[in-house]
Image (tube, helix red, strand yellow):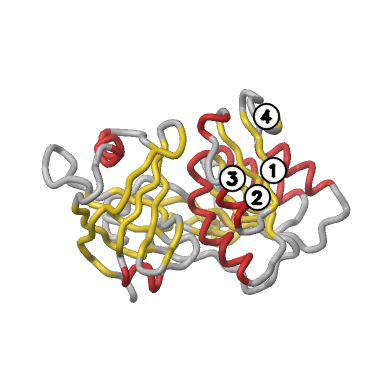
């Protein structure tokens, strides 16, 4: 397995939206093997109660460098946001499975809610590299928390925006745009790729099941070890009509077929 436990140094750590930062560091081996959907596990601090690493999706790869787009949601990410250029980090990765794009989608529709869009950026690059028509549906609470729109447009993704307060784009949920889009006859054989809050993913799955559209979701469960040992990140997966199995998001995931997740549990 091409997973590496390495020390690196922060090259930049910049605020890109309200409570959201983009961190860049040099991790040549991780950058070499990172695939869309995979993540890294970062040790933010030795001591002070922050003994566990935190998982972050690999946002972009540029040569020997990787970036991660993250949201401040607790003490760990608050401390991370305050770390300046030159700070040392201990990073493990790449981890997890990847999005499947072997059956060419026509088009690919990316649905990102909040910081969930971070899990879809490497995928967007892979799709556009293969010249696959890609549509990005980006949702946020408000304009100040909107992420990745310029990055997606820069690689040729057609972007549609939804905000909860209507400050920019569609006033409502990003799933409203998805429903309207799937109702149109102009789509050929679309595939949906989604990441975001659990409720959003459940709604996406319900919509795409009704339209019989294949859908892959990247789950964002909290993790402890990220190596499949602690079982702290499991989610319920349907094995067949009569059996549900709890699978580890860190190893069997983070990417799952949406129809396999038992959303009601």
Which image quadrant: the N terminus?
bottom left
Viewer-nearest of discs 3 and 2: 3
Question: Residue 231 is drawn in which quadrant?
Answer: bottom left
- Considering only order in the chain, which callout, 4 or 1, is on the residue closer to the N terminus? 1
Circle 1 residue: 160
Mark nearer the viewer, 3 or 1: 3
Distance in Å between CA atoms under marks 4 and 2:
16 Å
Mark 3 closeness class: few <14, some 14–19, many ≥20 residues within 10 Å: some
The answer to which of marks 4 and 2 sits earlier in the sequence is: 2
133 and 5: which is toward the camera: 133
Q: Residues within 10 Å of mark 1 (few under 14, many from 20)?
A: some
Query: Residue 142, how many percent across, how many down?
Result: 57, 28
| Residue farthest toward the bottom in the current orientation of the protein | 1
Which residue is labeled 4 in the image?
172
Crowd band around label 2 with a 10 angstrom C-alpha radius: few (<14), some (14–19), many (20+): many
| Residue farthest along the right direction in this orientation | 185
Q: Position of residue 180 (x, y in %)?
A: 79, 42
Residue under pointer 3: 149
Mark 1 → mark 2, Cα distance in angstroms: 6 Å
**Spatial distance from mark 3 to mark 2, Cα to Cα?**
9 Å
Q: Is residue 241 in view from this perspective?
A: no
Q: Secondary structure at mark 4?
A: loop
Q: Where does residue 243 sit, x and y in percent of width and height?
A: 53, 57
* Residue under the image location 30 percent in, 55 percent down: 41
Q: Residue 52 placed where, x, y %?
A: 22, 48
Q: Dot 2 corresponds to which residue?
A: 136
Q: Nearer the viewer, mark 1 or mark 4?
A: 1
Q: Earlier in the sequence, mark 3 or mark 4?
A: 3
Q: Is residue 242 above or below residue 3?
A: above
Q: Nearer the viewer, residue 63 or 245?
A: 63
Q: Quadrant of residue 172?
A: top right
């Amino acid at each position: 397995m091409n997973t590496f436990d390495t020390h690196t140094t922060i090259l930049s750590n910049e605020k890109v939206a309200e409570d959201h930062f983009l961190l860049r560091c040099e991790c040549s081996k991780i950058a070499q093997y990172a695939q869309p959907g995979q993540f890294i596990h970062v040790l933010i601090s030795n001591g002070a109660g922050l003994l566990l690493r935190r998982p972050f999706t690999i946002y972009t790869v540029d040569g020997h460098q990787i970036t991660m787009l993250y949201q401040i949601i607790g003490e760990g990410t608050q401390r991370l946001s305050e770390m300046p250029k030159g700070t040392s980090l201990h990073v493990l990765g790449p981890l997890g499975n990847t999005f499947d794009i072997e059956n060419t989608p026509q088009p690919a529709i990316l649905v990102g809610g909040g910081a969930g869009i971070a899990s879809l950026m490497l995928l967007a690059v892979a799709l556009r590299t293969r010249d696959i028509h890609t549509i990005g549906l980006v949702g946020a609470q408000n304009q100040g928390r909107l992420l990745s729109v310029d990055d997606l447009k820069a690689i040729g993704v057609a972007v549609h925006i939804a905000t909860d307060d209507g400050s920019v784009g569609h006033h409502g949920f990003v799933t409203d745009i998805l429903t309207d889009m799937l109702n149109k006859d102009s789509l050929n054989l679309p595939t949906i790729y989604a990441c975001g809050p659990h409720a959003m993913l459940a709604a996406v799955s319900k919509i795409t099941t009704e339209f019989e559209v294949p859908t892959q979701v990247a789950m964002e469960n909290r993790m402890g070890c990220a190596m499949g040992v602690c079982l702290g990140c499991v989610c319920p997966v349907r094995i067949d009509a009569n059996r549900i199995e709890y699978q580890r998001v860190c190893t069997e995931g983070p990417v799952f077929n949406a129809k396999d997740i038992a959303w009601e549990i």
